[in-house]
Amino acid sequence: MQGADRPGRGRGIVAAIALLAIAGGAIWVVKGRATPEPAPEKTATAKSVVVPVSVAKVERRDVAVTLSGIGTVQASQTVNIHSRIDGTLQSVTFTEGQQVKAGDVLARLDPRLAQATLAQARAAKAKDEALLASAQADLTRSLTLAKSDFASKQTVDQQQATVDQYKATIAADEAQIESAQTNLDYTTITAPVDGRMGMRQVDAGNVVHSSDTTPIAVLATLKPIAVVLTLPEKNLPAVQAALAAGPVPAVAKGGDGTVLGTGKLAVIDNQIDTSTGTLRLKAMFPNEKETLWPGAFVHVDLEVGTLKDALTVPVAAVQRGPDGLFAWVVGPEEVATMTPIETGTMSKGSAVVTSGLSDGQSVVTEGQYRLRPNSKVAVAGPGADTGATQKLAEREAAPPAP
């Protein structure tokens, strides 16, 4: 039995060895396939990413020195339309928002009481003129009789006093007539200046008085119009010097930067507000298109001088970082470098550079958000689609397809 078991046991060992060999071969094959092939040279890093940008030249030119402040638009003239006498408002002849000229009729009061007063004054004058005529006739007779000693000097003097009294009375009557005529004229309310009518605040049929605080309406002159603005008191010498040299141009802008009007500085207030340290100024604008409206807030730029041959860059090129202002400068190999700069005044989209740049350098004005120090750039021409340029640069930098 033992001899019979040995051949079977030997065959089992052989089978086990065969299985181990097969398993080992399989493991070797799997490892061989799992082992990565040597990586090809990375072509993606062979080219750095090219950033498309727009650039502008640093150049020298004359730059206007501009002071900016926030102002409030005010009508050049504002008139509260009141009645100057007591009476019933008979009619309102203007339309709300209507443009009127000086002398245009705005409203009428019931004139009958004023007409009656005027008629009484005229009648009183006629009566006193008749009495004066009679007194003058008596005086003439008395003078004739006095020459023949038929009338005393006292009688003549009394007659002369009566004549003088009636003359004074007639003068008073004339004053009464003029007063009554004026009150009658006041029953017709007219516009004192040119302007635009506001909303009606008193309707026809109401009794109005000269002492009323509520006006019938408000008349505002919008052409020209004024803007009152404030500037820091440190700007006073520059404004005074500019105003002494000639008219100071003023530009009014809306919150979005839209130009609403151009005008001139009219006056500097005669005192500085001690609580705020600011100076008030008034600029006048023709406002032909009525783009400036009373009560609106606007930004006002005053051109107080000119910097000759100043080094300038577009405002878009000026960037602010943790260490201050800087600009991206494109070198001869089209590599962008971050350059610290200092700026002065800014005017009409340009900034005056006081240090950090030199004439003729190229600075990035668009596409800065993708830049890093020493980034390779592709300069786009005026009006170029930087998005399309970016896609082209990415395709050129991408590795070739397998």
Image (cartoon, rainbow, N blue to C red):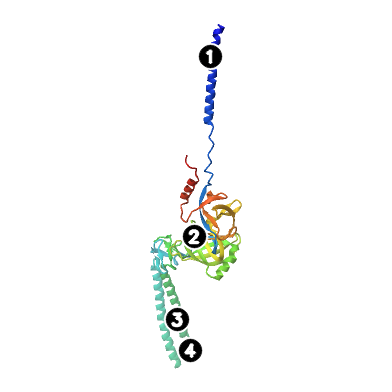
Circle 3 packing at 10 Å, graded few (<14), some (14-19), many (20+), is some
Residue topped by disc 3 = 167
Residue type highlighted by circle 4: Lys
- Foreground label between 4 and 1: 1
- Foreground label between 3 and 4: 3
Give the mark nearer the N terminus: 4 vs 1.
1
Give the mark nearer the N terminus: 3 vs 4.
4
Q: Position of residue 256 (x, y in %)?
A: 48, 56
Please indicate whether residue 80 sits to the left or right of residue 243 in the image: left
Residue type highlighted by circle 3: Lys
Q: Position of residue 321 (x, y in %)?
A: 58, 51
Give the mark nearer the N terminus: 1 vs 3.
1
**Separation of marks 1 and 2 at Cα, in angstroms:** 104 Å
Asked if residue 81 can be seen in this view, the reply is no
Q: Residue furthest bottom?
A: 148
Residue 253 circle label: 2
**Separation of marks 4 and 2 at Cα, in angstroms:** 86 Å
Residue 153 circle label: 4
Tell me whether circle 1 and circle 2 mark residues in contact (CB < 8 Å). no
**Separation of marks 2 and 3 at Cα, in angstroms:** 67 Å
Tell me whether circle 4 and circle 1 mark residues in contact (CB < 8 Å). no
